[in-house]
Amino acid sequence: MQLDFWEQRLPFEYPFTISNGRTKTHQHSLMVRLSLGNWEGYGEAPAIVYYNVSVEAMMEQLEKNRKVIEKFALIDPERFWHFLHHLFPNDPFLVCALDMAGWDLFGKMKKEPLHKMWGTEWNESVPVPICDYTLGIDPIEKMVEKMNAHPWPIYKVKVGTDYDIEMITALRKHTDKPLRVDANAGWTTEEALVKIPALANLGVELVEQPLAKDNWEGMEILKAQSVLPLFADESCVFEKDVATCAAVFHGINIKLTKCSGLTPALRMIKAAKGLGMKVMMGSMNESVIGSAAIAQFLPQLDFVDMDGPLLMTELNGVGLDYSFNNNNGSIAPLLRDGLGVQYRPPFVK
């Protein structure tokens, strides 16, 4: 194989803010390409400051290990992941980018889309979850403005402020669509016990990561009293976390980059469903490439948050349709081989 990699910066339409005041105006990502003959596979890993993940550090590791990666014989993507997992044991984001590219390349070599290789059907007759549109934290009037500018069937709202209830109350006046909230571990147990019933009365359908990732005692109290489904995000990063989360959450939100790729995500879905949990797959604001990888899991998911390309003003690929049959949020079946999309250098959409 031949390995190529480069950095990518794609601008957001609006500055994107989550709890604790973390804001970004661009998504800075590592892009990788694995080539073999006429086939090419692409992968992506976003840089996330609060996880101490930088593009520069990942590129340094790739250059250092280029020769050993290029010598690997790609005859099984799962074997490739195990090889990468041992090569970069402390860098799940980097492993994810290469694992994604490996699956894309392998799917193209086998002339099949990934969801079909995984034994799942996806066509016009197979219902898959609708993608939400995320509203980052802003002053209430700005959040209302963003929502009105982007009519959508489901909104995911970032919370974790001292005006969460006022925010959702204001948004509810402008839409009757389902709302989901993501606290990004921004509440205390006491806050959550007050806010969740109020949010339920405002038509919120689920809550992501209400408490700190290791506040298991608080989550036990919360699950016993919550009138809304609670989904683990920061608390459920790797495969080993699924069983722990089953006791105190109703579902999990899998992030490909955090769990180290498509390969472990397949196992996490199976484990979660075996424990009676609902499964969401979320994004770290990936571009078209990373979002297409998420889309390949759609037939296996209950909920999906893969709206990175919707939030950006530039794209880096074609073939990912968020308005199938003119229904916003409905993803058209990706029937091309591999990830199902074609890479293009960033262009204004």
Image: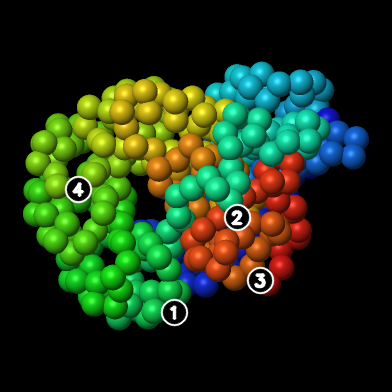
Q: Position of residue 196 (x, y in %)?
A: 15, 53
Mark 2 or 3: in front is: 2
Circles 1, 2 touching at the beta carbon (< 8 Å): no
Residue occupying the far right of the picture: 37
Residue at point 31%, 57% (across, down): 180
Dot 2 falls on a residue whose secondary structure is: loop
Instruction: Please report whichever mark, 1 or 4, sits nearer to the chain's N-terminal start.
Output: 1
Q: Position of residue 330 (x, y in %)?
A: 51, 58
Give me the C-alpha separation between circle 3 and circle 1: 16 Å
Q: Is residue 3 left or right of residue 126?
A: right
* Residue 332, numbered label: 2
Instruction: Classify the position of the N terminus by image quarter.
Output: top right
* Residue 314, numbered label: none
Circles 2, 3 touching at the beta carbon (< 8 Å): no
The residue type indicated by label 1 comes to Ala
Residue at point 51%, 65% (across, down): 327
Q: How is the image coloured?
A: rainbow
Instruction: Please report whichever mark, 2 or 4, sits nearer to the chain's N-terminal start.
Output: 4
Dot 3 falls on a residue whose secondary structure is: loop
Q: Position of residue 147 (x, y in %)?
A: 38, 74
Instruction: Please report whichever mark, 2 or 3, sits nearer to the chain's N-terminal start.
Output: 2
- Identify residue for label 1: 149
Q: Is residue 38 left or right of residue 123?
A: right
In the image, residue 83 sits, relative to residue 236, either above or below, namely above
Q: Residues within 10 Å of mark 1 (few under 14, many from 20)?
A: few
Residue at point 58%, 43% (across, down): 122
The residue type indicated by label 4 comes to Leu
In the image, residue 12 sits, relative to residue 174, either above or below, namely above
The residue type indicated by label 3 comes to Lys
